[in-house]
Amino acid sequence: MSQRSCAIWLGAVFLFLGNQLFEKFGQRVGFLASYADDFLFFPVTLPFCVMVLKKKFNLKTKLSFTQCVIVFSVFGALFECVFPLLNSNYVFDPYDFIAYFAGILFYYQFIRS
């Protein structure tokens, strides 16, 4: 990961942690509180997943856009369709798909390199 990508990733991590702290102490910042976690999920977690895959399977490639869309589709379906059926703590929100996809695009454009 380049220095620029690493700095952007660290920014995403700090935004995610900051949002979690706000939520923990009952502070909700409207739109941000509703969709920040969904937007930041892929930019924060995918670099770890890619690192593990590269170490375990000695891969030298980056995720393609098609692979990113597949990851988005699988996790979007799990989080928004399957989990709400299994646990009442999860709620289907179609706007979450937009936040997830925006996060995938952010990861692909700014962190993937």
Image: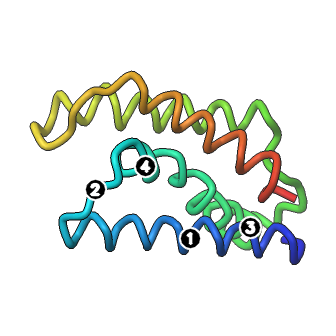
Q: Secondary structure at mark 1?
A: helix
Q: Secondary structure at mark 3?
A: helix
Q: Quadrant of residue 53?
A: bottom right
Q: Mark 3 touching mark 1, by CB under 8 A?
A: no
> Percent x, y for residue 18?
43, 72
Residue at label 4? 32
**1 or 2: tag closer to the N-terminus:** 1
Q: Say above or below: 65 vs 28.
A: above
Residue in the foreground of this view, choosing between 67 and 88: 88
107 on left or right of 3:
left
Residue at label 2? 28
> Percent x, y for residue 78?
37, 34
Q: CA distance from mark 2 to mark 4?
A: 8 Å
Q: Nearer the viewer, mark 2 or mark 3?
A: 2
Q: CA distance from mark 4 to mark 1?
A: 15 Å
Q: Nearer the viewer, mark 4 or mark 3?
A: 4
Q: CA distance from mark 2 to mark 3?
A: 24 Å
Q: CA distance from mark 3 to mark 1?
A: 9 Å
Check disc 3 and give the amino acid type.
Answer: Ile
Quadrant into which the C terminus falls: bottom right
Label annotation for residue 82? none
Label 3 Cα neighbours within 10 Å, binned few <14 / some 14-19 / many ≥20: some
Residue at label 1? 13
**4 or 3: tag closer to the N-terminus:** 3
Label 4 Cα neighbours within 10 Å, binned few <14 / some 14-19 / many ≥20: few
